[in-house]
Image (cartoon, rainbow, N blue to C red):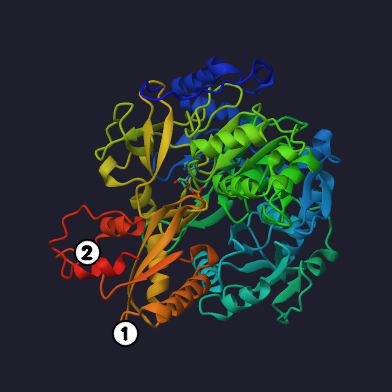
């Protein structure tokens, strides 16, 4: 480590190391070397060992149409078969697949056999409606067993699902339905969160009433809250009714490894959210391999990933990875702070969770809660079942890391700080818990077989100790295949000409430690914000703001926030005069509500400031760097002499 600062290193214990899938650094290096020496051979070996193929592949990586890479393209398999039938066939039918804990605390357990039956019935229901291989199905559901069943059901018949997070608005849902050209929508009457029942079906109805959704022929509605629900005859059907008379045997649709398993919309720096398209074989391979290597998953483990199925983490580490490994996992409907901020710790205790995977933003808020109320402090619970802790979604600050390590993990459990993205499908840079010496705040080293680097603007690798741009040097099996409906944008966004189209641009900055080569992610290098681990494009929020009748112009930037990582700050020019005092407060509220309605509550700016204009260069470009300084409350150090009206800086100081 750098000698300027004493960094504490946390080594795995000998005991942990002994039983670990990747045991010790020599084992880790051997895997990396295997991949280095024979890249295709390494991935092909794993694909043969970890997946059950209906038709074995003969091709491994096809780079002929770069950067539209293909993996195992002539092989055929089915993801749902690999997750469910495989476990039942192996004698795990009576093993608990899902422990569902509702917001209310009610617990429901589903075995692999039961899950296979439920998925098969649902898949048959979809088939009965005429949904077929390649059709897109949008899922807008709360955290529920039905949510997982819906995803697996689509996979079973080869329909490509696209989950829209239950916190997104009607407008956001509409946009995704239209872009995907979906034929069916699966939703619920509502959802429970923090003791409150919230509507979903009414939002879905609003979305469907907007232009662009007429491709939707069927709407399937799961009953969750029991709220009075309007059902449109000929279009809407209750989930329970749809599956009631279906057979629980459903022959899987065998698809090519390259068949699109799902599309998941995520934010980019420009334009509308992009539909990240994932494959079947390569995606599932890395979901499984990362369960084995990063989470060291064992038959007795109880795994809990706290993400929502609406995000990629919920796809890979709830719906697919754990089930494909025959794991018992927790699916949680509620929030970490209800009925109190000890909820996570109580659930770990009650269900004897052994591998726990959450986001820094949750940890930070629970640290704060425990500081204020000692009864919800993790040390008040029996967390002795834990053996591995994970972190994902944003950089974890060393102090939060240490708190997590000591108070949740009892200074016993390795923390895997996993860096990855919607586009990467699975972990890219992460410790191996039984091998990698841990340094708080660093995601350490690449996953075996993944080849990442830090480069400058020309694509040349920079020396360790020097910051740069994070890239992936070789295609990997679980990578994004394209952007749905927009292959040009795929190429431009991820394989830019600056790097001769040869390097995958992650969109993050990174630096490698000058002694160990460990990676630390320094944050996005584009106009993407990370608020509580949720990706938000500044452009999306700006477009939402200017769609409001009072707004003439808007610019959105991020500001560091102790709790949410980043907070959204909006600089707004109104069509009328600049409001002040009470009037300003009222407009701020109105605009926050508006953005919540246009995109979803997660996109609401925390801070809105009004100016008569925005600071622009002579050529009319908004000076975002200056706005970032203003947002942080920093002194302006930049030359502002070119500003048309320097007085507006005063107005925007907030
Ligand atoms: C950030 C979530 C630092 C990063 C799986 C990335 C992280 C974006 C980490 C992807 C981490 C994710 N350390 N930063 N361990 N994990 N990020 O697509 O900026 O929702 O590009 O995928 O989150 O967010 P996404």
Element assignment for label 2: loop
Question: In the displayed structure, does residue 66 sit left or right of residue 360?
Answer: left
Which residue appears at 64% of the width and 23% of the height? Answer: 21
Q: Residue drawn at (58%, 81%), measured in percent from left and top?
A: 209
**Which of marks 1 and 2 precedes in the sequence?**
1
The local crowd at label 2, few if under 14, some if 14 to 19, many if 20 or more residues have their Cα within 10 Å, is: few
Camera-side residue of 571 and 466: 571
**For residue 11, what is the image quadrant?**
top right
How far apart in space, not on screen, are marks 2 and 1 (Cα)? 22 Å
Residue 633 shows up from this direction: yes
Q: Which mark is residue 170?
A: none
- Residue 66, image quadrant: top left
Image position, residue 510 (x, y; %): 38, 37
Is residue 4 left or right of 337 when viewed as pictured?
A: left
Q: Is residue 332 above or below residue 647?
A: above
Q: Is residue 84 above or below residue 386?
A: below
Report the quarter where the C terminus lies: bottom left
Which residue, given by chain and number where applicable, does mark 2 sit on? 621
Task: Give x and y (percent) for residue 567.
Answer: 45, 57
Instruction: Report the residue at 64% width, 31% height from top.
Output: 292
Reading the image, the residue beneath label 1 is 576
Q: Disc 2 or disc 1, which is closer to the eye?
A: 1
Q: Is residue 560 left or right of residue 186?
A: left
Give the vertical position of 592 relative to 406 (above or below). below
């Amino acid at each position: 480590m750098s000698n300027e600062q004493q960094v504490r290193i946390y080594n795995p214990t000998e005991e942990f190391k002994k039983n670990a899938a990747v045991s010790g650094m020599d084992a880790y290096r051997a895997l990396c070397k295997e991949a280095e020496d024979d890249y295709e051979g390494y991935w092909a070996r794993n694909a043969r060992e970890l997946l059950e193929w209906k038709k074995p592949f003969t091709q491994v990586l096809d780079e002929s149409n770069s950067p539209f890479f293909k993996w195992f393209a002539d092989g055929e398999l089915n993801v749902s078969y690999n997750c469910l039938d495989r476990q039942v066939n192996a004698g795990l039918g009576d093993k608990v697949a899902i422990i569902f804990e509702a917001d209310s605390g009610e617990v429901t357990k589903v075995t692999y056999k039961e899950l296979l039956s439920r998925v098969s019935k649902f898949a048959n229901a979809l088939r009965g409606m005429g949904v077929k291989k390649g059709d897109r199905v949008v899922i807008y559901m709360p955290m529920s067993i039905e949510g997982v069943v819906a995803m697996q059901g689509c996979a079973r018949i080869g329909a490509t699902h696209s989950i829209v997070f239950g916190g997104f608005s009607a407008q956001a849902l509409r946009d995704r339905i239209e872009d995907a050209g979906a034929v069916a929508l699966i939703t619920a009457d509502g959802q429970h969160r923090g003791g409150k029942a919230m509507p979903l079906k009414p939002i879905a109805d609003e979305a469907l009433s907007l232009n662009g959704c007429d491709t939707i022929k069927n709407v399937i509605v799961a009953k969750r809250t029991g709220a009075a629900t309007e059902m449109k005859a000929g279009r809407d059907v209750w989930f329970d009714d749809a599956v009631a008379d279906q057979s629980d045997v459903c022959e899987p649709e065998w698809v090519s490894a390259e068949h699109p398993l799902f599309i998941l919309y995520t934010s980019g720096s420009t334009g509308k959210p992009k539909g990240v398209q994932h494959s079947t074989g390569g995606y599932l391979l890395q979901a499984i391999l990362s369960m084995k290597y990063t989470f060291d998953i064992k038959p007795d483990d109880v795994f809990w990933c706290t993400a929502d199925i609406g995000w990629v983490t919920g796809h890979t580490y709830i719906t697919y990875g754990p089930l494909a490994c025959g794991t018992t996992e927790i699916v949680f409907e509620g929030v970490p702070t209800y009925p109190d901020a000890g909820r996570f710790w109580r659930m770990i205790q009650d269900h004897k969770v052994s591998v726990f995977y959450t986001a820094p933003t949750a940890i930070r808020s629970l640290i704060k809660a425990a500081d204020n109320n000692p009864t919800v402090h993790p040390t008040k619970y029996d967390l002795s079942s834990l053996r591995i802790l994970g972190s994902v979604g944003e950089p974890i600050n060393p102090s939060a890391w240490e708190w997590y390590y000591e108070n949740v993990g009892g200074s016993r459990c390795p923390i895997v700080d996993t860096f990855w993205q919607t586009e990467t499908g699975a972990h890219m840079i992460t410790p191996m818990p039984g091998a990698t010496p841990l340094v708080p705040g660093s995601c350490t080293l690449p996953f075996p077989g993944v080849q990442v680097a830090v480069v400058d603007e020309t694509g040349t690798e920079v020396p360790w100790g020097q910051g740069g741009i994070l890239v992936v040097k070789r295609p990997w099996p679980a990578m994004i295949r394209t952007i749905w409906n927009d292959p040009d944008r795929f190429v431009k966004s991820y394989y830019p000409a600056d790097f001769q189209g040869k390097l995958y641009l992650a969109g993050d900055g990174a630096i490698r430690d000058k002694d160990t080569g460990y990676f630390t992610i320094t944050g996005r290098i584009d106009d993407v914000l990370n608020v509580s681990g949720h990706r938000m494009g500044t452009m999306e929020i700006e477009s939402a703001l200017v769609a409001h009748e009072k707004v003439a112009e808007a610019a959105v930037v991020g500001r560091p926030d102790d709790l949410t990582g980043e907070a959204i700050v909006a600089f707004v020019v109104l069509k009328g005069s600049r409001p002040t005092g009470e009037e300003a407060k009222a407009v701020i509220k109105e605009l926050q509500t508006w953005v919540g309605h246009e995109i979803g509550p997660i996109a609401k700016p925390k801070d809105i400031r009004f100016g008569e204009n925005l600071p622009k260069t002579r050529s009319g470009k908004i000076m975002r760097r200056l706005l970032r300084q203003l947002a942080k409350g920093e002194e302006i150090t930049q030359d502002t002499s070119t500003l048309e009206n320097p007085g507006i800086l005063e107005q925007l100081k907030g």
